[in-house]
Image (spheres, rainbow, N blue to C red):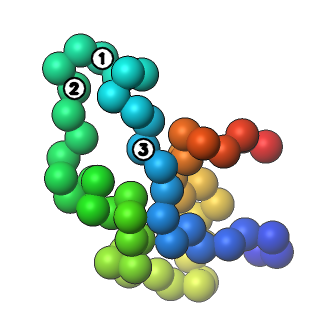
Amino acid sequence: MVGLNKQTSFNPYPQEMLPEGFKYPQSYLDLSKDTSTINWDSEFMFPWWFEDCQEELT
């Protein structure tokens, strides 16, 4: 697949956009800062990875 880059981080949606009382699990917040803990196999590239709240969808 050409044009896909592995995300190294992403921005979760801010608290004001989430339902009242919602809290991200700490492991998700940690992952948002560094995705290197995900086992990456270039043969099975996922084009979606994580939606970043600060990027426009294309």
**Residue at 38% from the left image edge and 64% from the top image edge:** 33
Question: Label 1 neighbourhood size at 10 Å, few (<14), some (14-19), many (20+)?
Answer: few
Q: Is residue 7 left or right of residue 57?
A: left
Q: Position of residue 57 (x, y in %)?
A: 72, 40
Q: Position of residue 38 (x, y in %)?
A: 37, 75
Q: Is residue 43 left or right of residue 39?
A: right
Mark 2–mark 3 distance (CA, rounded to whole Å): 13 Å
Picture layout, residue 45 above or below residue 47: below
Q: What residue does disc 2 label?
A: 22
Q: Position of residue 29 (x, y in %)?
A: 29, 54
**Residue at 27% from the left image edge and 62% from the top image edge:** 30
Q: Nearest the camera: 38 or 17?
A: 17
Instruction: Inspect the image, locate mark 2, and give the three-letter code of the amino acid beneath it.
Output: Phe
Q: What residue does disc 1 label?
A: 19
Mark 2–mark 1 distance (CA, rounded to whole Å): 6 Å
Q: What residue does disc 3 label?
A: 12
Q: Which badge, 3 or 1, comes first in the chain's sequence?
A: 3
Instruction: Inspect the image, locate mark 3, and give the three-letter code of the amino acid beneath it.
Output: Pro
Picture quadrant where residue 16 is located: top left
Residue contact between numbered discs 2 and 1, judged by CB atoms under 8 Å? yes
Which image quadrant: the C terminus? Answer: top right
**Residue at 48% from the left image edge and 64% from the top image edge:** 9
Instruction: Inspect the image, locate mark 1, and give the three-letter code of the amino acid beneath it.
Output: Pro
